[in-house]
Amino acid sequence: MIGKYGLLYETYLKTHRRIIYTNLLTAGTLHEHLADIDTQANERLECLMKQMVAAQGITEALKAADQMAWAGAMNNIKACAEEIVLKEIVYA
């Protein structure tokens, strides 16, 4: 199944890398390639988020003490990690 990042990559290929898109489509490997990109992006996102959470010291204790601060920190971490994933994998 192709998720968010696979679909974003497909749009990128259609718009900016038409030859690669056409080659993958005619070879019958487009769906497989998009699924692979989606898997790579999700794995990288998860890894980055874990590293950033550890680096910033976001803990379950913070979640219990101040849920709004925890939610804000986690949203910030996810946004930063997504930007990295988009730059490194999707739009590379």
Image (cartoon, helix red, strand yellow):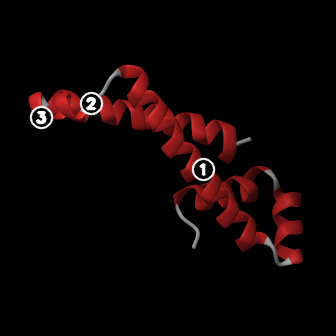
Residue 73 at x, y percent in the picture: 30, 28
Which badge, 2 or 3, comes first in the chain's sequence? 2
Left or right side of 15 for 28: right
Q: Residues within 10 Å of mark 3 (few under 14, many from 20)?
A: few
Which amino acid, by three-letter code, is at mark 1? Ala
The residue drawn where x is 30% and y is 27% is: 58
Position of residue 71 measured from the top left corner of the image (x, y, whole percent):
23, 35
Q: Which of pointers 2 and 1 lies earlier in the amino acid sequence?
A: 1
Are discs 3 and 1 less than 8 Å apart at CB? no
Q: Earlier in the sequence, mark 3 or mark 1?
A: 1
Does 9 sit above or below residue 87? below
Residue 63 screen position, x and y as percent: 18, 34
Which numbered mark, 3 or 1, is in the foreground of this view? 3
Work out whether residue 17 or residue 88 is closer to the camera in this orientation and state it: 88
Identity of the residue drawn at 75% across and 56% down: 13
Which quadrant would the C terminus be assigned to in this image?
top right
Q: How many marks?
A: 3
The residues bearing labels 3 and 1 have C-alpha atoms spaced at a distance of: 30 Å
Q: Secondary structure at mark 3?
A: helix
User: Disc 2 to disc 1, how far (Cα)?
Assistant: 25 Å
Structural crowding at the residue carrying mark 2, measured as other residues with C-alpha within 10 Å and reported as few (<14), some (14–19) or many (≥20) = few
The residue located at (87%, 76%) in the rendering is 26
Q: Which residue is labeled 3 in the image?
A: 64
> Which mark identifies residue 59?
2
Q: Which residue is mark 1?
A: 41
Q: Is residue 30 left or right of residue 82?
A: right
Q: Amino acid at mark 3?
A: Ala
